[in-house]
Amino acid sequence: MAYRDALIAELKYESDLTKKMLERVPVEKGSWRPHEKSMTLARLATHVAEIPHWISRIISIDDWDFAVQGFSSHSAASKEELMKTFHDKLNQAIADLETMDDEDFNKTWIVRRGDQMRREMLKRIAIRGWGFSHLVHHRGQLSVYLRLLDVAVPGMYGPSADEK
């Protein structure tokens, strides 16, 4: 099996779980945040929906500079926008992964903010970290937001306390 095929299968599996979480987001409470230093619910949910785009960025841009390319601070205004963002970014990530050969994953990816920060890693590592682990991390944060808002949390790798 090609490495890309394993990543695509895992991305589809994790995305099914992420979709369950995003569908529960009460967008009418989008400005809520658990702490003044925390993202708002709308920003966090949108960030989760956007994360598959990191896979596309890693594949298409060898040197990502936040000082040049910036980052999104957009918050979806509706459930429809949130889900469309997620599906669009996911579909593009899958399409981009399908273009990769095994040797492409051994190319170097650089992420930085001007001269302040610089990390170099293989694209195979960057995709796992910035694409997959990043998604799971923020999806976990989103589950805590939902719990604090008394929204039933869907199970991810087994049932949640809200599921029997």
Image: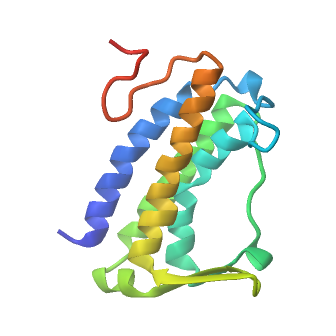
Residue found at the far top of this picture: 164
Location of residue 34 by image quarter: top right
Query: How many numbered discs sit on the rendered protein?
Result: 0
Q: How is the image coloured?
A: rainbow
Tell me: 156 left or right of 83: left
Relative to the observer, which residue lies in front, 42 or 12?
A: 42
Where residue 9 appears, x then y in whole percent? Answer: 29, 54
- Residue shown at the point (60%, 25%) measured from the top left: 146
151 and 87: which is toward the camera: 151
Residue 26: x and y, percent?
A: 66, 23
Residue 103 in the figure: left or right of residue 29: left
Q: Quadrant of the C terminus?
A: top left
Task: Give the x, y percent position of residue 102.
Answer: 29, 80
Residue at x 39%, y 46% (from the top left corner)? 14
On-image quarter of the N terminus: bottom left
Look at the picture and state if 51 lies above or below 25.
Answer: below
- Vertically, is 37 above or below 133? above
Classify 122 as above or below 90: below
The residue at the point 71 percent across, 34 percent down is 41
Q: Is residue 40 left or right of residue 23?
A: right
Determine whether, in the image, residue 135 is placed left or right of residue 158: right
The residue positioned 49% from the left and 75% from the top of the image is 59
Residue 159 at x, y = what percent? 33, 23
Q: Is residue 49 above or below residue 118?
A: above
Q: Residue furthest left?
A: 1
